[in-house]
Amino acid sequence: MGSNIEENHDDVPHEQLKGKKGSSMKLKRHDSLDVEASKMPDAKKVLGTSVMLKLAFQSLGVVYGDIGTSPLYVFSSIFGGGIKHEEDVLAALSLIFYTITVIPVIKYAFIVLAANDNGDGGTFALYSLICRYSKVGLLPSTTAEDSEVSNFKLDVPDRRTRRASCLKSALENSEFAKFFLLIATMVGTSMVIGDGVLTPCISVLSAVGGIKYAAPEAMTQGRVVWLSVAILIFLFMFQRFGTEKVGYTFAPILCLWFVMIAGIGIYNFSIYDATIIRALNPAYILRYFQRDAKAAWISLGGVVMCITGAEALFADVGHFNVRSVQISMCFVTYPALILAYLGQGAYLTKHPENVSNTFYASLPKSIYWFMFTVAVLAAIIASQALITGTFAIIQQSLALGCFPRVKIVHTSIKHHGQIYIPEINTLLMIACVLTTIGFKNTDKLSNAYGIAVVFVMFLTTCFLVLIMIMIWKTHILLIFIYFLIIGSFELLLLSSCLYKFDQGGYLPVAFAMVLMFIMCVWNYVYRKKYNYELDNKISAERVRETVSVTNSHQRLPGLAIFYSELVQGIPPIFKHYVENVPALHSVLVFASVKSLPLSKVPLEERFLFRRVKPYDLYVFRCVVRYGYSDVHNEEEPFEKLLVERLKNFIKQDYMLSIAANGDDQGEAASLIEKDVQVLERASNVGVVHLVGEQDVVASKGSGVTKRVVINYAYNFLKNNLRHGNNLLNIPTKRMLKVGMTCEL
């Protein structure tokens, strides 16, 4: 619709710069506010050793609860039908050792964590990273408006770069590949959120089951279930205190847990069978499959349980940082787990009949109840890993327009990734309670859990291959080895888990389908709305014409702020407003609010302005930048600050024009004084906040599916979740909603 107001002549008049080549080069600005608005002052800070160790300590209480409590149920999951051969224990122990070494340590701690997206992890982080290096995104953030962050920058041409370029071109030219990547990302995200439901259930049920082992008559299975439900409710109520407080509260308990299971492992290792160390020989695995290949293959679904929570290393990295997670994994978690499993294996060589309750049966009687208490506390903490990971993933999904609006509470002013989402926390709690009551024991839950865990791991492996080729430009031989070893092993584990689909494995698939439907509906309409605004944004000529016509009549005194998601251009809601209310305020500001991953944005850097020419229209574009702990629009302070910064911009804008053209400074000073007075009079009369309230309907002639998705599914989600003005905390006393119907 004609030229947009982002063109260079709207910032510095083109004819003013003719013949001023030197000045033009110095005074050149970016066409788009989006580039400047995304700049993060002082965003990167080097963490000292003490802070790193502090984060590593906190991560114990958040990241490793799930994988740390796996010794509670791994051997019982592997040998559901009992131990058939004396060497089966050695084979299972060998499988556990190599599985933990290859996937959580080598793959996640040292490879996957390197693929973080500016410190954030998870499936959406990988997808975002891929989209920034190739134009495969179907999300609005990857349209031409945001192309500055989507360029694929090639290095010096070589074979690896050409390979990366070929893959990039193939992905960009395939609509199927684009949709497949987005859908795969949503499926993986849905599976991780499903893990957030299953993890608390299986961990707490396993720990509380220790009472039933010690006193089977007094503690029935029903009582175990209801006690577990009470513990789960307490856990989710505790989330509102934030990751930092949760981490500091839980980290000492997890430290004690790891020390105790390592010590008990050494004790059992020395008491029962010191030769259990021979299980590190992978030959026992081969003989295990030779004896009964099908039974061995089915038991791999139980082996998966020793790496539950490994994906939390990546999903939760945004709450800490890469180095702190690597330190806690390599120096605390991994050694403790290996010692614990060696001790349990040594015990089972002498007492194979107790495989169904290996952990509690192998405890020395003198510390049984003490370890039971620590186990229950550790199981509660185990739930924390996926809960916080779910919060982080929802935040990423929300930012990319793939999830309905929810309230995000930042619980730390030091670390931007530490967040709490009340609505998601409540929904997870309800789902966990219902799942625990419905399944009642860990047997079916372990079947359900395995599918979700391994699917997300394999999806991460596939995305990482794309990153290795396009971004890291890794040698093709190393990529082949990586996928051959890790990818093939994960596929084998996944096939074993799918064997038990009808025994509980359907649960994560059901969770994923529900979440996928919500995410697909929201993302589909979100993209349609964004493209609608891009296609119908108001041109510079149209804005000038509209305001000029209004100028011929009396403009209303006051300052009007129009809010829009578009950083570039004037939104179509403005045209709708003018057509129905043919009067404009004396000063107009089109504001777009952007959130940056910083604790606080300095006040002097919060506002970015551009001016629509000619100057006597008094129309400005503005980007308001907030950090995650800044208060959005605190009424008078916000408005006063905006006016003050706008005054400064007016002065600087004239100074740029004087420098470019050599205009008379006295004349410029009078113009500055005039514009500042107009602005002050307008702000003194009053500030009105105009917010677009768009109703979305399917266009005439749309198919049944499109009408159901837009008219019913999307509008149901929209009407039952938070509205934009609630998220921005716009003052209701001076807010005016402008209704508009968008036909998509």
Image (cartoon, rainbow, N blue to C red):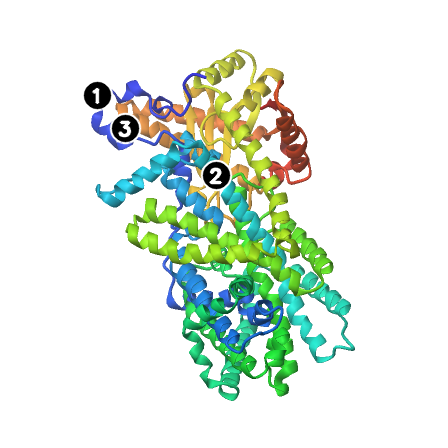
Which element carries disc 3, helix, strand or loop? helix
- Residue 69 in view: no
Of the two numbered discs 1 and 2 on the same chain, state the one appearing first in sequence.
1
Residue receiving disc 1: 19
Q: Position of residue 662 (x, y in %)?
A: 26, 24
Q: Quadrant of residue 25?
A: top left
Q: CA distance from mark 1 to mark 2?
A: 52 Å
Instruction: Looking at the picture, tell me which residue is in the foreground, 27 or 370.
Output: 370
Foreground tag (1 vs 2): 2
Q: Nearer the viewer, mark 1 or mark 3?
A: 1
Does label 2 or label 3 sit earlier along the sequence?
Answer: 2
- Residue under label 3, please give it: 659
Disc number for residue 104:
none
The residue that appears at 52% across and 67% down in the rendered structure is 292
Residue 180 badge: 2
Question: Amino acid type of disc 1?
Answer: Gly
Alpha carbon separation for disc pair 2 and 3: 52 Å
Q: Is residue 213 above or below residue 413?
A: below
Tell me the kind of residue under disc 3: Ala
How far is mark 1 from mark 3, CA to CA?
13 Å
Q: Are marks 2 and 3 in contact (CB under 8 Å)?
A: no
Find numbered disc 1 in the image and state the secondary structure of the residue it sits on: loop
Among the 4 quarters of the image, the one containing residue 53:
bottom left
